[in-house]
Image (cartoon, rainbow, N blue to C red):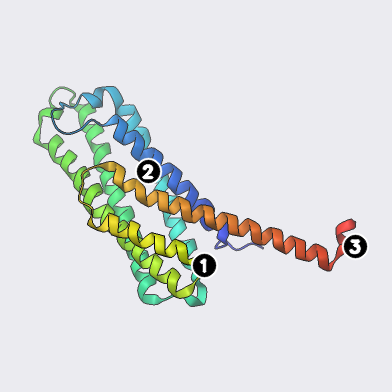
Amino acid sequence: MTRASSPRAAGITGLLFAILFTLSVVILKVSVSDVSGEGGQWLADSAGSVTFAIGLMAFAGIFFLWFIGVVRARLGRLEDQFFSTVVFGSGLLFLAMVFIGTAVAGAIVTGYQRDPTGFTDSPSYWLARDIITQVFSIYALRMAAVFLLSQATLWLRTKVMPRWMALLTYPLALLLLFVFTESFWVVLVFPAWVLLVSVHILIVSFRRKRDAGDTATQMHPDAASD
């Protein structure tokens, strides 16, 4: 029986999160116009695309939650309670910020459908736009940075991941921690990191499986010939 916390499970869930999250953010960025000088015309043109992106984000969150659990389980007895708590907490808060931002975007679409003529001129529309920007560009980025910092520290201590990957994680975390921008594109640094980690985990997992098969063949050549 294969454990659900196998390295392959972490790689697959992380890969799915990175793909769905990136696709959702790209659709939202392309569909939603910049705040300055717009009157909500994007709602008439791209409401369906925004709704689709929101649905993708929900599934991306599910895969990220699974990714957190599987990566944490990989540490096993090497788990440090302090840093593991920070990893778990920051990951959940990042996910909460993302869900809040996408939920507000969904509320904007719903509000426009109820009042296509007057909603975009109301204070509620601009408040919702500002909430989305603040949630993604400040709070979600900071929680992602803390997640990366604590994860990299755990890797250096336990050596469950290559040293170069842990060292690469630190500057990416500092970028997310100290950058101040309202651009949605910066948040894509995080799924890119998850994608890198997931691909590495899958490659190592397949190599170990292949090596184990070669070892079994060498130990039992007669069984292999049958």
Instruction: Measure the alpha-carbon separation of dots 3 and 1.
Output: 35 Å
Quick one: SS at disc 3?
helix
Q: Give the quarter of the figure containing the N terminus.
A: bottom right
- The quadrant in which residue 2 appears is bottom right
Residue 222, labelled with which disc?
A: 3
Q: Is residue 71 left or right of residue 221?
A: left
Query: Do the CB atoms of the residues marked 2 and 1 lie less than 8 Å apart?
Result: no
Q: Is residue 201 left or right of residue 134?
A: right
* Label 3: few (<14), some (14–19) or many (≥20) C-alpha neighbours in 10 Å: few
Q: Is residue 158 left or right of residue 128?
A: right
**Where residue 197 sits in the image (x, y, percent)?**
48, 56
Quick one: SS at disc 2?
helix
- Mark 1: which amino acid? Arg
On the question of residue 92 being in view, the answer is no
Q: Give the quarter of the figure containing the C terminus.
A: bottom right
Q: Is residue 56 left or right of residue 2?
A: left
**Where residue 173 sits in the image (x, y, percent)?**
32, 59
Which residue occupies 40% across, 65% down? 151
Q: Is residue 32 above or below residue 64?
A: above
- The quadrant in which residue 57 appears is top left
**Where residue 195 sits in the image (x, y, percent)?**
46, 50
Among numbered discs 2 and 3, the one appearing first in the sequence: 2
Among numbered discs 3 and 1, the one appearing first in the sequence: 1
* Label 2: few (<14), some (14–19) or many (≥20) C-alpha neighbours in 10 Å: many
Residue that carries the numbered disc 1 in the rendered image: 74
Q: Nearer the viewer, mark 2 or mark 1?
A: 1
Quick one: SS at disc 1?
helix
Among numbered discs 2 and 1, the one appearing first in the sequence: 2
* Label 1: few (<14), some (14–19) or many (≥20) C-alpha neighbours in 10 Å: some
Residue that carries the numbered disc 2 in the rendered image: 57
- Mark 3: which amino acid? Asp
